[in-house]
Image (cartoon, rainbow, N blue to C red):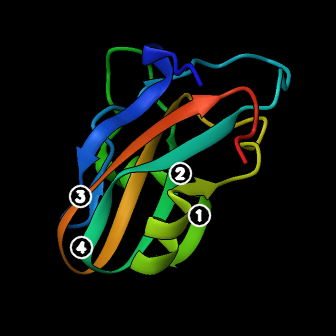
């Protein structure tokens, strides 16, 4: 599978505590719904010491070149809590398509419980759902 570098939130991002993606994406503001787009979250390196991970897709209003303030981010989709065993077995967290009219910026928030000592993720937007 090919991933567009311009549509990546995280590439092999190490997660040992709750964090946001290395990159937020500016999608702009267009009228209309366009094509469905899907978040793809993959476990690149297995987790160790993790109790659960919840992946949240967040959206915020803003203009290009001006990142939104932390309080502006709203969760628009969530994976629910996944255990270490579930993550390491499936290696992928699936989402449905994003809401058609999300705000201008998107990012991923990783909410961890437990004391993770290892584990990395890659996250991006793709046009086709990965199963």
- Quadrant of the image for the N terminus? top right
Characterize the local packing of mark 4: few (<14), some (14-19) or many (20 or more) Cα atoms within 10 angstroms. Answer: some
Residue at screen point 80% across, 18% down: 31
Q: Which mark is residue 48?
A: 4
User: Could you say which is closer to the camera, residue 18 or residue 123?
Assistant: 123
Where residue 56 appears, as percent x and y from the top left, is 50, 59
In this rendering, position of residue 57 left or right of residue 121: right
Q: Are marks 2 and 1 in contact (CB under 8 Å)?
A: yes
Q: How many marks?
A: 4
- N-terminal-most mark, 4 or 1: 4
Q: Earlier in the sequence, mark 2 or mark 1?
A: 2
As measured in the structure, the alpha-carbon distance from the residue carrying label 2 to the one carrying label 1 is 6 Å
Whole-percent x, y for residue 120 in the image? 29, 51
Which residue is under mark 2? 57
Quadrant of res 71: bottom left
Q: Is residue 56 visible?
A: yes
**Secondary structure of residue under mark 4:** strand
Task: Decide if residue 28 is on the left or right side of residue 113.
Answer: right
Q: Residue at x 37, y 60 (%)?
A: 110
Instruction: Check disc 1 and report the residue beneath it.
Output: 78
- Residue placed under numbered mark 3 in the picture: 15
Mark 3 vs mark 4: which is more N-terminal? 3
């Amino acid at each position: 599978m090919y991933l567009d570098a311009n549509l990546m939130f995280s590439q092999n991002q190490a997660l040992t505590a709750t964090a946001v993606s290395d990159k937020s994406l500016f999608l702009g503001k267009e009228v209309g719904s366009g094509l469905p787009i899907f978040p793809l979250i993959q476990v690149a390196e297995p987790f160790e010491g993790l109790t659960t991970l919840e992946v949240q897709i967040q959206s915020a209003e803003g203009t290009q070149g001006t990142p939104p303030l932390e309080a502006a981010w709203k969760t628009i989709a969530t994976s629910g809590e996944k255990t270490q065993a579930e993550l390491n077995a499936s290696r992928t967290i699936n989402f449905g398509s994003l809401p058609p009219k999300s705000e201008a910026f998107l990012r991923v928030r990783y909410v961890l419980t437990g004391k993770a000592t290892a584990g990395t993720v890659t996250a991006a937007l793709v046009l086709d759902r990965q199963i």
